[in-house]
Amino acid sequence: MEKLQYISQGNTFREQELCVRKALDNGVKWVQVRWKNAPENELIKLCEISKQLCSEYQSVCIINDHVQIAREIDADGVHLGLNDSAVKDARLILGENKMIGGTANTLSDVIQRIKESCDYIGLGPLRFTTTKEKLSPVLGFEGYQHIIDGLREKSIDVPKIFAIGGVTLEDILPLQEIGIYGIAVSGLITKQPSIINELKKVMI
């Protein structure tokens, strides 16, 4: 599983598509298509084009929230928030071979996601971010450390956790030292797609 995930950004179809193209052009191997409050026909079109582009670049394409769209376009999987579809329902719709990720903010969320057999967990936010409208409590490095320690105290294997929420290049090594598997980035890559190469170098 790739350690760097790009979460698409943009207020219009054109902005979203351009951001996905730029991220792929600069070497991203995993795109999560996320466009809140989009008109449904435009969202479907964006998902179709993103899936096609990801296939051309031999990259993973997952869809945020929309399980049925993920199934219709044969995306590689779906990412579910805590208030979205149940993981078991998504698994029935998508099948065993598709990737299902889940959002978490607390230790109990992480344990819930492990029990639900999520393939990876997006844990955050690391710090304040303007990308997400309804932001969960900020974790900071201490929050991540507390959660990883909590899992180890309970003798639970640490799953593939991606830090999300205002993550920068300088955060990667401290996060990896804590035991975080990868990062999911939106604003940083949207503003500066050329940073992808540097991010990947640090994450080896």
Image (cartoon, rainbow, N blue to C red):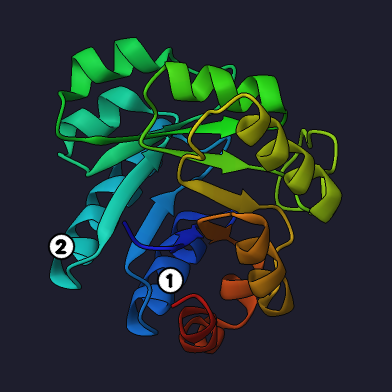
Residue placed under numbered mark 2 in the picture: 55
Q: Look at the image and tell me whether residue 111 can be seen.
A: yes
**Residue 133 rendering spot, x and y as whole percentages:** 75, 39
Q: Nearer the viewer, mark 2 or mark 1?
A: 2
Most foreground residue, 60 or 122: 122
132 versus 165 height, above or below: above
The three-letter amino acid code for the residue at tag 2 is Ser
Q: Residue at x 67, y 57 (%)?
A: 178
Residue sitting at x 23%, y 63%: 54
Position of 172 with respect to 100 (left or right) is right
Residue 195: % across, % down: 56, 86
Q: Secondary structure at mark 1?
A: helix
Q: Is residue 39 above or below residue 128?
A: above
The reply, left or right, for residue 160 in relation to residue 150 is: left
Mark 2 or 1, nearer chain start: 1
Front position in the image: 184 or 47: 184
Q: Which residue matches tag 1?
A: 18
Q: Quadrant of residue 28?
A: bottom left
Task: Looking at the picture, tell me which residue is in the foreground, 45 or 71.
Answer: 71
Residue 115 got which mark? none
Q: Amino acid at mark 1?
A: Leu
User: Residue 93 falls in which quadrant of the image?
Assistant: top left
